[in-house]
Image (spheres, helix red, strand yellow):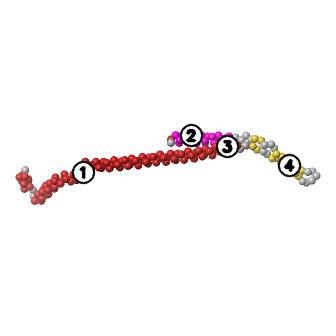
Amino acid sequence: MFKYISEILSQFTAPQRIIALLLLLFSIVILTLGPSYIDSITLNKDEYKIEIDNQKKLNKEFSDEIQRLNRQIIDNQRKCTDDIISREMEIMNEIEQLKRDIESTPVTSSRTNQMVIQNPDSDTSRVIHILEPIRTIDDPRPQMMMDGLDRIQKKIMGDVNKMKGNN
């Protein structure tokens, strides 16, 4: 085989021979150093196991952190919902107080008439105040207010029940 290499090289010019020898030298270097270089840059089985164990530890830490953050989100949502429910219950109590005030306030009216009496013998006159009896006036506004407050209370209770159901 080597005797044919010399015949092949003899047919090349001097610069072509130098290039051919450099290519040959380069190929020999790659073939001898290549496997050891590949071994040095690749991980062996033990290194793979260590790397996998490190990844598992990181995954566990991330999983624990995700669970903690999810719990925190759920707790914050519950607290927010509880605060909203508490506020709506305060509003309900205020509405109840308003309803009691409306029910306890009578809708009445009284009129005062004045009568002027003049004395024919003198230029003086006297004013007499005449009170008429108190009359109850049928005013539809309190009942309309009560109906409106009842509707508001029903809507608030519906919202509160929905929020309690989602907790």
What label does residue 42 carry, if any?
1
- Residue 100's tag is 3
Q: Secondary structure at mark 3?
A: helix
Task: Tell me which label, 4 or 1, sits earlier in the chain.
Answer: 1
| Dot label at residue 158 | 2
For the residue marked with disc 3, what is the amino acid?
A: Arg
Residue receiving disc 4: 128
Sequence-first disc among 3 and 4? 3
Residue 162 lies in the magenta-colored region: yes
State the separation of the CA atoms marked 3 and 1. 84 Å
| Nearest to viewer (mark 2 / mark 4) | 2
Q: Amino acid at mark 2?
A: Gly
Front one among 144 and 60? 60
Nearest to viewer (mark 2 / mark 3): 3
Dot 4: what SS? Answer: strand
What crowding class fits label 4: few (fewer than 14 Cα within 10 Å), some (14-19), or many (20 or more)? few
Q: Which mark is residue 64?
A: none
Amino acid bearing label 4: Ile
Q: CA distance from mark 4 to mark 1?
A: 118 Å
Q: Residue 106: percent from the left, percent from the top? A: 72, 43
- In the image, taking residue 46 as reference, residue 103 lies left or right, namely right
Earlier in the chain: of badge 2 and badge 4, it is 4
Q: Would you say 160 lies left or right of 3 here?
A: right
